[in-house]
Amino acid sequence: MPLPPILEVGGVLISTQILTERFCCDLEACGGACCVEGDAGAPVTLEEIGEIEASLDAAWPYMSATAQSVVDKQGVAYTDVEGDLVTSIVNGKDCVFTYYDTLDPQPSTFSPQPSKTPCCLCALEAACRAGKSKFLKPISCALYPIREKHFSGGLIGLNYHRWAICEGARKRGQELDLPLYRFLRAPLIRRFGEAWYNELCEVAAMPEFKELRS
């Protein structure tokens, strides 16, 4: 029987691609392009804006002078053309919290080892990893390439955003046989809780998902 394109898990609608797509970020391949590609900043909530402002002093040394100037003029976030709150950007492109380095500040279990390849990294995350603040990064950044959508009545949907710049991540995910929902275990738990994530894993363990390869 064909898999349905959308499933409901714990009251959240999810694309089945989140369970079947193999994915693992590879900074050597993409250079952190998702921080600078596009025409708007990362979606943020009002609560996150408050946390970002509280972490700003710690992140400030990692930010470029141009980014600091943008924040001085318009703050850490703005409302985009679609009416969504997003992080401020530099030159209509880079997130103000983007900084460039040759090392991943703290590679995760599945991230590549630090290399000499220049990468776009996150000033907020760097400050948090260094123990200078408590806010890691907006949940929209942590969940990418999963994108969250809100519907009327409080219903939430999760979609997989397929982007050409993430081809290296898909290749690496295939090599590791690592499903997207496993790669994003920590941010999914951060957003929806461990009980919800365990329910998601139970659904993914169903034979039709275990046998399927993207």
Image (spheres, helix red, strand yellow):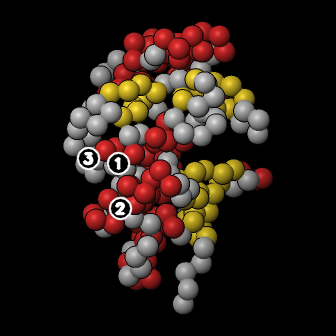
Identify which residue, 195 or 123, lies in the foreground. 123
- Residue furthest to the bottom: 1
Q: Is residue 8 above or below residue 125?
A: below
State the residue position of label 2.
171
Q: Are marks 2 and 1 in contact (CB under 8 Å)?
A: yes
Question: In 3D space, how far apart are the residues under numbered discs 2 and 1 (Cα atoms)?
Answer: 10 Å
* Left or right, residue 209 beside residue 118: right
Mark 3 residue element: loop
Nearest to the observer: residue 25 or residue 47: 25
Residue 136 seen by the camera: no
Tell me the amino acid under the disc marked 1.
Ala
* Mark 2 or mark 3, whichever is nearer to me: 2
Q: Mark 3 is on which residue type?
A: Pro
Residue 187 horizontal/vertical position (percent): 44, 46
- Dot 2 amino acid type: Lys
Q: Earlier in the sequence, mark 3 or mark 1?
A: 1
Local packing at callout 2 (Cα closer than 10 Å; few below 14, some 14-19, many 20+) is: some
Q: Which part of the image, by quadrant, shows the N terminus?
A: bottom right
The answer for how far apart the CA atoms under marks 3 and 1 are is: 10 Å
Q: Position of residue 134 (x, y in %)?
A: 40, 24
At a point 45% along the width and 53% down the height, the residue shown is 166
> Which residue is painted at 49% across and 63% down in the image?
18
74 up-or-down from 186: above or below: above
Disc 2 to disc 3, C-alpha distance: 13 Å
Above or below — where is 70 with respect to 169? above
Q: Residue at x 34, y 17 (%)?
A: 132
- Whichever of labels 2 and 3 marks the residue nearer the N terminus, that label is 3
Tell me, for residue 29, which label it has, or none: 1
N-terminal of the two: label 2 or label 1?
1
- Residue that carries the numbered disc 3 in the rendered image: 112
